[in-house]
């Protein structure tokens, strides 16, 4: 039943039985702690510059008259 909703429920049940009821909390916590870049929150000026660059790039085709 791989890839179905019932298969997912069965897998979640197995994981919780094998590794404890807080299995998904633990793996989510590990993933959250692995991040170390900081992203745009670390540098607001860089975010502003990048947003301006993206805003100037039009995805629409140029209309000819």
Image (cartoon, rainbow, N blue to C red):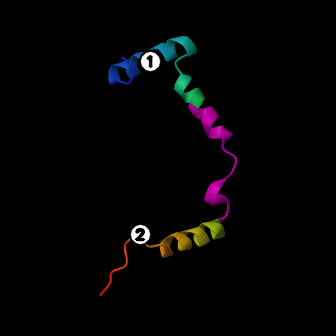
x, y percent for residue 16: 50, 16
What secondary structure is the magenta-colored segment mainly? helix
Q: Kindly identify the residue that appears in the image at 55 percent across and 16 percent down.
A: 20
Q: Kindly identify the residue that appears in the image at 45 percent across and 20 percent down.
A: 12
Counting residues from the start of the chain, the first of labels 2 and 1 encountered is 1
SS for tag 1? Answer: helix
Query: Above or below — where is 1 with respect to 42?
Result: above
Q: Quadrant of the N terminus?
A: top left
Mark 2 to mark 1 CA distance (whole Å): 42 Å
Quarter of the rendering containing residue 27: top right
How many other residues sit within 10 Å of disc 2, few (<14), some (14-19) or many (≥20)?
few
Residue range (magenta): 28-43
Q: Nearer the viewer, residue 60 or 31?
A: 60
Labels 2 and 1 touching (C-beta < 8 A): no
Image mark for residue 11? 1
x, y percent for residue 52: 54, 74
Query: Above or below — where is 46 with respect to 30?
Result: below
Residue most toward the left? 65
Quarter of the rendering containing residue 47: bottom right
Q: Kindly identify the residue that appears in the image at 52 percent across and 18 percent down.
A: 21
Q: Which residue is mark 2?
A: 59
Q: Is residue 13 left or right of residue 18?
A: left
Quarter of the rendering containing residue 33: top right
């Amino acid at each position: 039943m791989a890839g179905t909703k019932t298969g997912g429920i069965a897998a979640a049940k197995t994981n919780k039985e094998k590794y404890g009821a807080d299995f998904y909390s633990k793996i989510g916590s590990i993933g959250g702690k692995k991040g170390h870049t900081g992203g745009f929150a670390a540098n607001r000026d860089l975010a502003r510059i990048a947003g301006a660059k993206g805003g100037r790039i039009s995805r629409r085709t140029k209309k000819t008259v």
